[in-house]
Amino acid sequence: MQKPIPIDLAQFSAAQVAEIADTTIKVIATWTTRDFAGRRDPRVKRGGGVARRYSLRDALWFALAAQLHRRYHTPLPQLQAIARLTFGGAFTPERAAFVVVASARPGSASTHYCPDIAAVASQIQRLGCAIIVIDAREMFGRVMQGARLMLSEKERAA
């Protein structure tokens, strides 16, 4: 059995997160500057030459945001709300399920957590507007696989 990776331990560089999340380091830097993710030690001043470290949760946020932005040009404030609902503080791998994002008109969206596919079908029927369904379990598995590969390469190099 593989050792679990702590979800909130800051252990990845921006380049590693970009690779895990299937995005660019430029996107990671831009969104980090806009406080999307990448918590930093409050004692470290910005621009002090100390590289930020990112957690697995940050990698999940970036993977989700990059996918939504690439496909639907979702603005950053909505990306933050969707990422918070999908992979926020209450998220655990066991709780990973589906998030339905409904948009009745451009620029507005509501998000709904659905524990299973039956709940997704119910939401789609009830909402009746443009919908995106996020499979958080699949995304978690993909990001976790990338993180495990990254950490194993790091161990081999040490």
Image (cartoon, rainbow, N blue to C red):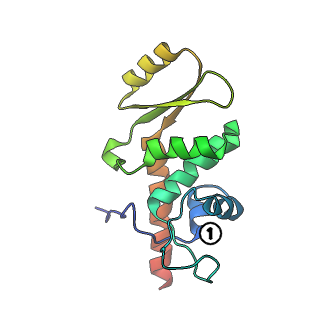
Q: Quadrant of residue 98?
A: top left
User: How far across and how far down the image is residue 134, in percent?
Assistant: 51, 36
Q: Which element type, helix, strand or loop, lies under badge 1?
A: helix
- In the rendered image, the residue lying farthest to the bottom is 158
Residue type highlighted by circle 1: Ala
User: How far across and how far down the image is residue 29, in percent?
Assistant: 66, 64
Of 62 and 154, the residue lying toward us:
62
Q: Quadrant of residue 130?
A: top right
Where 120 sits versus 149, above or below?
Answer: above
Residue at left 39%, top 37%? 97
Where 81 sits versus 128, above or below?
Answer: below
Q: Is 25 displayed left or right of 113 in the figure?
A: right
Look at mark 1 in the image and give the residue it sits on.
Answer: 15
Residue at left 62%, top 55%? 22
Of 52 and 95, the residue lying toward us:
52
User: How far across and how far down the image is residue 16, in percent?
Assistant: 57, 68
For the N terminus, which image quadrant?
bottom left
Residue at left 68%, top 36%? 72
Of 155 and 105, the residue lying toward us:
105
Q: Is 65 displayed left or right of 60 in the figure?
A: right
Residue at left 56%, top 60%? 20
